Structures are given as structure tokens and as C-alpha cells.
Image: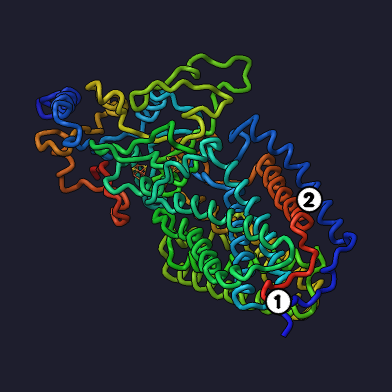
Amino acid sequence: MTTFATPMPGNEVKSPNWVQWVAWALTVICLAAGAYGFYLRFTEGHAAASYGSYVPWGLWIAAYVALIGASAGAFGFAAVIFTLRKTEYYGLARLAMLVAFGAFAAGMTNVWLDLGHPFRFWKLLTQTSWTSIMGWMSWFYVIYGLILVVGLFLTRNGVIPKFMERFSWIAFLFAIAFAGAEGALFGVVGARALWESGLTPILFLVEAALFGVGLVAAGALIFGAMNQQAARMMGVAMLILLGLLLLLEWAEYTTALYASVPAKTSAVMTILTGPYWWVFWGLHLGLGVVLPGLLLLFGRGNALLTGIAGALIAAMGLATKLNLVLPALAQEELDGLAHAFTGPGLTFSYFPSTMEWLVWLGTLGLGGLIVLVGHRLFSLATPTRSSASK
Amino acid sequence: MADIVPKENLLVRMQEDIRRALEKPEGERRWGMVIDTRKCVGCHACTLSCVAENKLPPGVVYRPVLDQEIGTYPNVTRRFMPRPCMQCENPPCVPVCPVNATYTRPDGIVAIDYEQCIGCRYCITACPYSARTFDVGYTYTEGTPEQEVYELLPNYEYGVEHARVPGSEESPIGNARKCHFCLHRLEQGALPMCVTTCIGVANYFGDLNDPDSLVAEMAAQPNAVVLKEELGAKPKVFYLV
Ligand code: SF4
Ligand code: SF4
């Protein structure tokens, strides 16, 4: 039995194809936009943002949870491949670790810039409150970041060490705990009826897995690292996860609407029929579920279509998370609050400001840059094999 | 006439109540407030005096007065409901803070350590009463030819001088902020500003642990209710309805 990864088309070092050029171009555009956004963030502070007192979290927090979720999903995907010793997908697993790191860095930059005092972030580690899920998450991030960097470094020559294969199940469990805890961050907030649900962490797990595999599929398309077999495998995984996501959303929304508890019903109605209804129906359902679902169904085993479907799913992850974060906050907690006292930030409507969009683009550019440079740095184009094959 | 004019000055009685409370160890006090919605006329004096006392910038408010309309026209009534921080006994905002910047003091006031707060705003999302606001860093006279001096005056919340430096991210800019029952005044034996300035004396304030205090008497009235009782936050602000 050979333990060499089946060479995939494009696995050998070669000059970048056109998809890579597009990826580079988008990354550079995002970084250029982001540079101006970062400048605004540090010169004008939060005053240039649209979030405030009543809607305290906005685009950046939605992007952060979407990216961190996708990162955990991609990491979990790699861990499963190593645990099951699927040597034919080892190359893909290394790529998954890299995109997981890129998404992680982008997500963390979003949340870092969202802090009122970004340069006090170290207090999260030196003065952690263990009653806070956010406190726990801070340590999870440190451990997670280290695992990713060490994992990428150890596999940079294309050989997967034996211990990684043996202990990947632990990494897989960690990915589940990590993504679930991210959901618990919202699930435990009793004040927000939309978040406070036992389903929230489960939803986060499914979304993490879905966005993660989507991101890996998109990455595999960019680097030409997907053959028919891999496309089929990832396509099936994404279809199953899409189905699960729909099932959970259906359960959550229909029970809320039927029970008619005002706080939750109004949040769900905001999602379905509010001013940004198109985020749910158009971006999330249309471009994030139906279109990729069709591409995957009719393009089974087709690397291009699977990659495009994955990219759509991963990109529309933001819409999914926007629909979690914002409608829950955009509810008057007490009748009459909206008009009791007015001023900037004392409003229940929110649309990201130019500065927020620019910074967000910049963080995506940063993630993209990490992946594009990391692909060379960690020699991801070299064929990958298990150390057991020596 | 004798029935209309109160026999005692309620403010003076409350003042005495808090002086008595201050003689006790901090851990034995339990500051609380009762708001008589039947006496509130919705003048917003409390809101504005709080803004002035704590030098609140735009976008930050500690005690808005909610104007609630009950019923459908023409069968409507109006109710005014001032909403300070409830200083919950089981405050959902405290355990979520990742750096222990928000905590319950021994006297029951939920405080924020401005120098410790990282501005993550998790507590704002966790408060069921929207009692927390985010100090983004605005000033009222920003963009006008002259930055007014009063905007730069320090506030003395929590008994500490906090200078305001517009354009910076120096605390309290970048922090979560909320009502603290004018702790800096309380510790000097003065009532919270909203209580002092209420034109109808619709607020009763004092030590809930003192059965002789006016506030304890009022909180024990059968028509005293708390908001969103079902959430279990156990507010120490009661409403007479
Ligand atoms: S009202 Fe809100 S801010 Fe005040 S103690 Fe309760 S939960 Fe905390
Ligand atoms: S905003 Fe400040 S007080 Fe509130 S949870 Fe974050 S660190 Fe704690």
C-alpha cells in the first residue's frame, strides 16, 4: 500500500494559473482599501463607525465570527483527514491548515480593531475572567494559533509526522470545542432572545464545518489542488452540511414564529422581512445555499464548480453571521427606548460605515496575503506524504 | 390642605437615610431606588441633570425617560418610565466581562473599572435593560469653530477624576458606561443627581437593608414591581405602578 498522496493536478510547482492571478489582484485591492480603512480607524477611532450604544456590534463582529468559524471548520477538516489516514488528501489537509490560519488571522484582526481599547488586549490573557466565555475564547485563540503555526511548520517539507496522524483526533475535538464555544458566546446571552438557544452552539458547529470546507474548496481551486475525487468528496460534505444548516434554521425560525414570544419573533421577523431582508433571502439563501447547492448537485466531481460553490458558501458565511449578530441587537429592549434620548449610536438601525467596510476588506486582504505567501513559504505545492511511508 | 402638603420633606428624609447608611460598613448597605411612575410627568430633568453631572458625551445616556403609549387611539394612556441601571443583584453584565472590569461592589452597585475595560461591549449585549452605552468619543461641539470648554471638563465617576481627551482613546472614551447611582455623590452623603432634581420627587433612594428608610418602605408596597422579573437579574430599581 502506498502512503504517498495521490499527485493531484497542479500539485507540482508551476507558475501561477489565472485563478491565482485573480486571487492576487483581489488581495492587493483589498489591502489597498484596507490601508485607508486602518488609517481612518486609528485617526478617527470608533467615531467613524456606525455601531454604537444600542447596536454595539456590527460588521466586524459578524466577520470575526464568520472567519473564525470557517477557520475552525477548515482545521477540523484537516484533522479528520489525518485521523482517518486519508493519505490521498494529505495535500488538501495541509492547504486546509493554511487557509485556517489565514481566516484566523483575518478574523482576529476584525475583533481586535473592534475593541474600544485595542492596546489593552493583553488584559484578556493576563487578567482573564473565567466566568466569561470570551475569557475562555481568548486562551483558545492562543492555543489554536500556536497549533496552526506549529502544524504548518512541521509539515513544511511535505511529510506528515506520525504523531500528527496519531493525535489529530485531539485536534478534531479541540476544533469542535472551539467552534461550539464561539456559539456559546452568543448562546448564553439571556438578554437576546434570538441568541439564547441551545441550538446556537450547534448551529455554529455546522456553519463552521460548512464554511470551512467551502473555504478549503475555494483554496484548492486557486492552487489547482483539487482532482475529481477530492471535488466529489468535498461536494458531498458541503451538500450534507447545507442540508443540516437548513434543517437547523428551519427548526429555529419556525418554532420562534409559532411560539410568538415577542422578543424572539420580532428578531426573526427582522431577519425575514426587515429592511435588510435581502441579506437573508438573497445573499444567504440565494447565493449561499441554493446556488452552491445546485452547482454541487449538477457539477459533482467538477473541480471548477466545486471550487466556485465553496467560494460562494464561504463568502456568504458573512451574511449568515450578520443575520445572527444584528437582528438580535436591533430590537428595543424596552418599549420607547428608541425615542427616549437621541444621539449618535442611540439608534436601533445599523448599516456599516465606509470605514467599517474598508477595514473589513483590509482584513480579508491580510488573510489572502497569508494564504498566498504561505503557500510558497510552507512549500504547499510539494507532494505530501505520511512519514510512515519511509 | 394639610393632606396635600407632605408632612416631611422627602428629600431631607432620604438624605438622612443615606447618612445613616454611610455609617454602616460598606458590605451592609444595599443601595436601591424606587420610581413612582404615577408621579413622573416626563419632564426629563433627571436625564439632563445626569448628563450634566457625569459630563456625558453624545451617544451616552444613563437615565433616559421612556415615553410609553398604552392602548390604541383614541383609547390611549401614556406612561413615563425613567430607566437607570437597575444595579441588578444577579447582574448578567458581570460574568460576561472577560477581564473583570465590571463587578459588583459590596454595597450592591455594579461598577466599571474604566482603566481595566477593554471596550469589547459584551456587557452591553448582555444587559436586558439597555442600561449600558458605548462611549465612542464624540463631543457636542466637534466640527464647530470652537471646542467648548465644558466638554473637556473631567467627570468624577467612581470618585476618580477622568479627563476627557477628544480624539484619543483614553478612558472613558472607548469604554462601556452606565449609571452608578452617582456613587461619587453618595460617598459624600449626597443623593444621586436624578433624585435631587426630579421636579415631582418621583424617586426614592436609599439603603434597602434599612427597614426605616423611605426607599425600603416604598419597595415593600404591594404595587412595587421590577422590570423583566422573569429574567432573574433581580433589579434593585423598583417601579410603583
Ligand atoms: S441593569 Fe444592566 S448594566 Fe445595570 S446591573 Fe443590570 S444588567 Fe448590569
Ligand atoms: S466593555 Fe468593558 S466592562 Fe464591558 S465586558 Fe467589555 S471589558 Fe468588560
- In the displayed image of the protein, which residue is found farthest to the front? A390
Secondary element at tag 1:
helix
Query: What amino acid is labelled 2 in the image?
Result: Thr
Residue type, label 1: Ser
Closer to the camera in the image, B239 or A222 = A222
Chain of residue at mark 1: A
Name of the residue lying farthest toward the bottom: A1
First along the sequence among labels 2 and 1? 2
Relative height, residue A128 to residue B154 (above, below): below
Q: What whole-number distance in Å separates the C-alpha atoms at marks 2 and 1?
A: 37 Å
> In the rendered image of this protein, does residue A301 appear above or below residue B150?
below
Expressed as whole percent of the image width and height from the top left, the position of residue B6 reads 14, 27
Direction from residue A203 to residue B100 in the image, left or right: left
Residue for point 57% across, 16% down = B147
Which secondary structure, mark 2? Answer: helix
- Judging by the rendered image, the residue that carries numbered circle 2 is A27
Residue at the spot x=73%, y=37% of the render? Answer: A36
Placement of the C terminus of chain A among the 4 image quadrants: bottom right
Dividing the picture into quadrants, the one containing residue A144 is: bottom right
The picture places residue B4, in percent across and down from the top left corner, at 14, 28
| B97 vs A308: above or below | above
Q: Position of residue B180 (x, y in %)?
A: 33, 33
Q: Left of B15 or right of it: where is A364?
A: right
| Residue, disc 1 | A389
> Can residue B67 be seen?
no
A193, A381: nearer the viewer:
A381
Residue at figure coordinates x 26%, y 35% from the top left: B39
Q: Residue at x 32, y 47 (%)?
A: B91
Mark 1 beta carbon near ligand 2 (under 8 Å) = no
